[in-house]
Amino acid sequence: MSADAESDDMMFCASCGTAEVDDIKLKDCSACKLVKYCNVKCQRKHRPQHKKECKKRAAELRDELLFKQPESSHHGDCPICCLPLPIDNDKSTLMSCCCKLICDGCEYANTTRELVGNLQQKCPFCRHPAPNDDEEADKNFMKRAEFNDPVAILQIGLRRRDEGDIEGAFEYLTKAAELGDAGAHDVLALMYDEGKDVEKDEKKEVYHLEKAAIGGNPRARHNLGCHESERCRYERAVKHWIIAANLGHEGSMQNVKEAYRGGLVSKEDFAAALRAYQAAIDAMKSPQRDEAEAFVALQSTVN
């Protein structure tokens, strides 16, 4: 074994040079993971020398996480048909009893079965009786929130906002975001962007957009791309739009198309994004969902 290979296998404190042995455990720099320290005192002492390299590597690690293609949107799959849920929230129904998001196709099929069989209306997933009104649905959400269900907490926050209770809404939205809900991060980002209900804060807006994008929220990813584009960081903007387009986000696909026309995207990358976009759209289709959409369209014409 070469001397260099042997030294690479050894672990030393970057400040004092203490080697990692059985009774001495070194800890990674929490930001960059490049160096190790035996204690906080050594880390602080070494900070002036390490700061520049640490900041650069931390940014690289952040981008690796930020620009990783999610396997699916933050909605995931419908728990009934196991197909990817539509990005459009209007094409799915949230069950207040179990906080499961059910695609309109499965909800329509379940409702049809209940009507034909003259059966009691129940949740198609957990079989809990359907709430009779919004008040009962709110009670269901509150029960789920007591067990720290981020989806329920998000819904309560949204309802508080609609009622004009901004302080209460912000509290619930923040808690849902802390529990990792990408939708809550997206809502908070919009609030900080608009500056209506909270003080406008670009830094916090970007923070929540990035959290939501990493969590698979296509709208947040799209908005993050627009934010980068407005600051002439076109390469980063295109990366965001391609990731969102791969999840089936129409607006991002349009932006990728415009970027291709402007010479910011190669022909190969544009073709790949277009194929991935179409594949995502096709994956969200089913005969049941088509029937449900046709029924909704018919209802709108009748009304």
Image: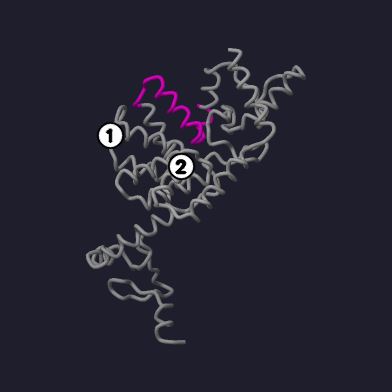
> Does the magenta run of residues contain 156?
yes
| Secondary structure mostly taken by the magenta-highlighted segment of the chain | helix
- Kindly state the secondary structure of the residue where label 2 is placed: helix
Highlighted range, magenta: 142-167
**Disc 1 packing (10 Å; few <14; some 14–19; many ≥20):** some
Q: Quadrant of the C terminus?
A: top right
Label 2 sits on residue: 252
Q: Nearer the viewer, residue 296 or 110?
A: 296
Residue 123 located left or right of residue 72: right
Give the mark nearer the N terminus: 2 vs 1: 1
Residue 222: image x %, image y %?
A: 43, 41
In the rendered image, the residue lying farthest to the top is: 303
Picture residue at 35% right of the left edge, 68% below the top: 35
Residue 283: image x %, image y %?
A: 62, 42
Instruction: Please name the amino acid that badge 2 sits on.
Output: Ser
Q: Nearer the viewer, residue 193 or 41?
A: 193
- Label disc, if present, on residue 200 of the rendered structure: 1
Q: Is residue 107 visible?
A: yes
